Amino acid sequence: FKESLQVFRGKKTQTFDEEEVELVCNIGRAEEAENVTLQDGEGIGLFRSEFIYFDRKDAPEEQEQYRIYAKVLESMEGKPVIIRTLDAGGDKDIPYLNLPQEMNPFLGQRAIRVCLDRKDLFKTQLRAILRASVHGNAKIMFPMISTVTELSSAKEVLQEAREELKAEGAAFNPEVEVGIMMEVPSAAIIADQLAKHVDFFSIGTNDLVQYTMATDRMNPAVKGLYKPHQPAVVRLINQVIQAGHQAGIWVGMCGEAASNPMMIPLLVGMGLDEYSVSPSCVLETRWLISKIDRKKAKKLLPQVLELEGAEEIEESVRQFLKENG
Ligand code: PEP
Ligand code: MG
């Protein structure tokens, strides 16, 4: 099976009726960029930068970060590299940040909330990314955005970083795209408002499912609820994609659902523009997308959006694949 996937190497990623989409990769460590190229990924859709902050005594300085981002960008040779700013908190503890002990860490000081609280830490990272942007096709993405105000504050810090660099005469690409993770239900609900302020969305289903369904993504006791096929989640994903398109921006997905064979027909029907998957899933995902007719998948969607349970939605996808796979 793995052998037969090799015919998809070097091919474009397109649906059965030849609608092209982008198929990129999620990475944690910079060294994994090599894997992206090896597995034929079309770029990086999620560089989880928090890994740079782990296992050390203090925060990485600007120059160290700059070198890491520049190296990844160069190795991608002009292909897109979406660098997600620090997503600390939740289950990702970074001792030297002295984050508060919380009763509900996933609902507390996490990701952009930490960064807006520690602007120096945040600005250091943004300066490093901006400076590295001359080495390739960098894009900046903020995690855990839940309000327009948070996004505006994050963009303000980014603007300060740009102005500082300009004053210092440091080179950077002023056109770097800025996007947000769509992983909090409040953001998905106001996607139309957020879309006016960014260049792209990337749907983080790992957290979007957790927060929408109020189910811990790590707790096996509630895994029956933790499903991207839950009607509430399917509707939110669709709403985010349509809101993005209405505002003229592109929409990707970097949560695990992007490579889920039972989700791909729905995502193709919704018109998702970019799929960011683990490097080992690239060829299989390209194959799965190539089997789906966009027009047929689009027709399936209105029915699916009316179904009342995750099992019914799964069954409808299964039926679709049987008839069209
Ligand atoms: C997500 O939440 O779907 C996501 C991609 O981010 P992480 O898994 O790093 O929280
Ligand atoms: Mg997340």
Image (tube, rainbow, N blue to C red):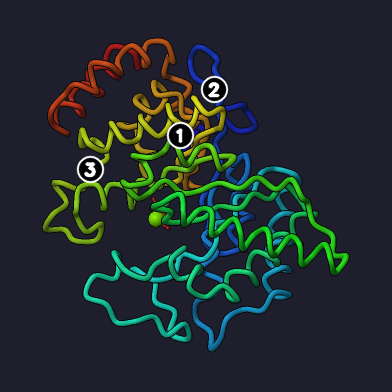
> To which residue does mark 2 refer?
14
Residue 126's x, y, as percent? Answer: 65, 64
Q: Is mark 3 within 8 Å of ligand 1?
A: no
* Number of residue marks: 3
> To which residue does mark 3 refer?
227
Q: Closer to the observer: label 3 or label 2?
A: 3
Dividing the image into four equal quarters, which quarter contains ligand 1? bottom left
> To which residue does mark 1 refer?
285
Foreground of the two, 85 or 36: 85
Q: Amino acid at mark 2?
A: Gln
Q: Residue drawn 33% across and 11% down?
A: 299
Residue 159's x, y, as percent? Answer: 68, 58
Q: In the image, is residue 144 above or below residue 88?
A: above
Spatial CA span between label 1 and label 2: 10 Å
Sequence-first disc among 1 and 2: 2
Q: Secondary structure at mark 1?
A: helix
Q: Amino acid at mark 3?
A: Lys
Instruction: Using the rendered image of the protein, determine whether residue 4 is visible from the camera's viewpoint.
Output: no
Q: Residue drawn 11% across and 58% down?
A: 221
Foreground of the two, 86 or 3: 86
Sequence-first disc among 3 and 2: 2
Residue 288's x, y, as percent? Answer: 42, 27
Spatial CA span between label 3 and label 1: 19 Å
Q: Residue drawn 28% across and 31% down?
A: 235
Q: Secondary structure at mark 3?
A: loop
Pointer 1 local density, CA inside 10 Å: few below 14, some 14–19, many at least 20: many
Picture quadrant of residue 289 = top left
Instruction: Using the rendered image of the protein, determine whether residue 39 is visible from the camera's viewpoint.
Output: yes
Spatial CA span between label 3 and label 2: 26 Å
Q: In the image, is residue 150 above or below residue 212?
A: below
Assign the N terminus to one quadrant of the image.
top left
